[in-house]
Image: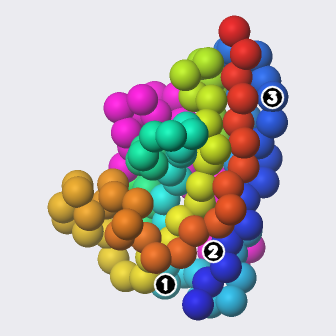
Amino acid sequence: QVQLIESGGGLVQAGDSLRLSCAASGGTFSNYRSAWFRQIPGKDYEFVATISASGQSTFYSGAAKGRFSISRDNVKNAVYLQMNNLRPEDTAVYYCTAALGPMPASMRNRNSFDKYPYSGRGTQVTVSS
């Protein structure tokens, strides 16, 4: 069973960049696909980006495409989310998640928080205007 710990959040201004990190332990991380979600209080989890176990396949939400980049280092057991040109609407708690197995063909299965059994506690990102 894998444990996930996020870091790298903070308070930035609009247009700035942040790099979130997710450290994994307790499992063979190269067997897990991973995803980043975000949540605003009182709202559902919003899909941001996902990456396959090998790192060869990635998918992004419309809000993230072109500004965010997901990557991983299976030697370091880590997943990253590089966020550029941040906007106030990106303000949220960001969660790293993981699931065993290959990337699903179905977008619904890729983008649903409940399809990822493992999740960290989140890191707060606040973007001021």
State the residue at coordinates (37%, 49%): 59
Viewer-side label of 3, 2: 3
Q: Secondary structure at mark 2?
A: loop
Q: Is residue 32 above or below residue 17?
A: below
Coloured how? rainbow
Q: Nearer the viewer, residue 105 or 127?
A: 127
- Give residue 69's quadrant in the image: top right
Mark nearer the N terminus (3 vs 2): 3
Residue 64 lies in the magenta-colored region: yes
Q: Quadrant of the N terminus?
A: bottom right
State the residue at coordinates (73%, 16%): 128
State the residue at coordinates (26%, 68%): 104
Pointer 1 with pointer 2, Cβ within 8 A: no
Spot occupied by residue 66 in the image (x, y as percentages of width and height): 46, 28
In the picture of the structure, the residue carrying the numbered disc 2 is 74
State the residue at coordinates (72%, 29%): 126
Q: Is residue 53 left or right of residue 106?
A: right
In the picture of the structure, the residue carrying the numbered disc 1 is 31
Spot occupied by residue 125 in the image (x, y as percentages of width and height): 70, 36
Given the image, on which type of amino acid does mark 1 rest? Asn
Mark nearer the N terminus (1 vs 2): 1
Given the image, on which type of amino acid does mark 2 rest? Asn
Task: Please tell me how crowded label 3 is: few (under 14), some (14-19), or many (20+) other residues with Cα within 10 Å.
Answer: few
In the picture of the structure, the residue carrying the numbered disc 3 is 11
Mark nearer the N terminus (1 vs 3): 3
Q: CA distance from mark 1 to mark 3?
A: 33 Å
Q: CA distance from mark 1 to mark 2?
A: 9 Å
